[in-house]
Image (tube, rainbow, N blue to C red):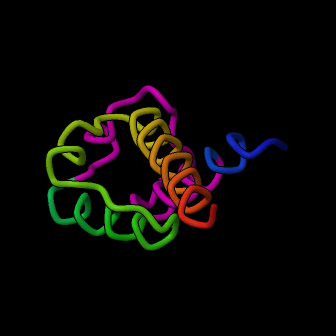
Amino acid sequence: MNEFDALTERVLTMFSRGLHVVEIAPDTPLLDYGLDSVRSVELVIELEREFGIAISDEEAAMLHTARDVIACVAAKTTSTRHTRAEARA
């Protein structure tokens, strides 16, 4: 399993658990799974802690599907790794 697949699995598991559903389809709107504003904030905080990233309110508002979330987390974790590597150099 590559790094992106592992990240995808972690995000889908987190959302499945958080939304109390068996499986999350990547392109199904999260609202269809019962995501509300309170649970959305909780999941964003959980993502930030789990992956060591920051997601602004504006960014969070653009995350409509699990695929959106995965892309956001992947971009931010890649960016964070590059920033840390540059700081060490």
From the top left corner, tell me how far across and down residue 86 is, in percent. Answer: 56, 56
Q: Quadrant of the N terminus?
A: top right
Above/below status of 78 relative to 53: above
From the top left corner, tell me how far across and down residue 68 is, in percent. Answer: 39, 34
In this rendered view, identify the residue nearer to me: 56 or 39.
56
In this rendered view, identify the residue nearer to me: 21 or 47.
47
Outermost residue, front direction? 89
Above/below status of 6 relative to 84: above
Q: Residue at x 25, y 41 (%)?
A: 31
Above/below status of 7 relative to 48: above
Q: Residue at x 39, y 58 (%)?
A: 19
Left or right position of 41 against 80? left
Q: Residue at x 50, y 32 (%)?
A: 26
From the top left corner, tell me how far across and down residue 13 is, in percent. Answer: 58, 56
Residue 88's image quarter?
Answer: bottom right
* Segment colored magenta: 9-35
Residue 18's image quarter?
Answer: bottom left
